[in-house]
Amino acid sequence: MRPSLPDALSFLSLPAEIRNQIYECVLEGWLIAVRPDPQRKDRLEYGIWPATVDPFEVMGHQPARSADRSSNALSLLYTCRQIHAETKLLPYGLNALLIGERYPPRTLIEGTLVQLAQVRRMKLCSYTPPSMVLSRVWLETLLWFENLNEIEVHWQLRVPPWGSEEDHISTATIDETIMKKKIIDATSASCKISFHRTIVWE
């Protein structure tokens, strides 16, 4: 006679340390893109993408998912009430947040302060000169993220057919140095800041 198997353990009966390791394996490795919903001022749109995707591909994608709908990538959060309580803030701390050239409404930002406090990594993406977007959008946005330790700025350097490529790159490097100082002043001196420049020939 074959011996009987012990009763299977339920997921929630596992020790919290093991559950947390499983949560991290499932919820880590994504890029969370956030932007205002063009149709409704009281709502944000978001998209969940693999962390390795090009930020420009994300920002150019239409349509984004609205923030009141779940994504398959984060469906674990909605399995049951206890799992939701244990995981609802983890995606913000485990993954990078992507912000484009449009500033989220202040009322929506104020309603997500607990989530924003979890964010450690952010990617900023701009098709236009980032120094303009920095002053108009990003500096005000960054003030809401108190615990950032890494910021990536992805931007396109558009080079016209006239002039020297070296001159344009030299100017871009100076602009990045100025932007880095402004970002540090707005966030934290310990925040790691990197620039990822894509040259586009016009």
Image (spheres, helix red, strand yellow):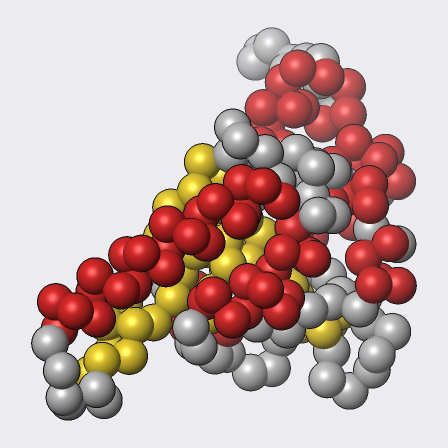
Residue 33, image quadrant:
bottom right
Please identify the quadrant where the N terminus is shown: top right
> What residue is shown at x 55% (from left), y 83% (from top)?
62
In the displayed structure, would residue 148 be above or below residue 10? below
Residue 162, image quadrant:
bottom left
In the displayed structure, would residue 175 be above or below residue 148? below
Q: What is the x, y in percent for residue 177?
A: 37, 50
Q: What is the x, y in percent for residue 69?
A: 76, 66
Left or right: residue 103 versus residue 109 is: left
In the displayed structure, would residue 134 be above or below residue 63? above
Residue in front for this viewpoint, 63 or 76: 63
Residue 26 in view of the camera: no
Please identify the quadrant where the C terminus is shown: bottom left
Residue in front for this viewpoint, 132 or 196: 132
> What residue is shown at x 83% (from left), y 63% (from top)?
106
Residue in front for this viewpoint, 72 or 67: 67
Left or right: residue 57 versus residue 186 is: left
Q: What is the x, y in percent for residue 3?
A: 60, 10
Left or right: residue 123 versus residue 13 is: left
In the displayed structure, would residue 202 be above or below residue 102? below
> What residue is shown at x 73% (from left), y 67% (from top)?
104
Residue 5 in view of the camera: yes
> What residue is shown at x 51% (from left), y 28% (from top)?
190
Q: What is the x, y in percent for residue 71?
A: 66, 61
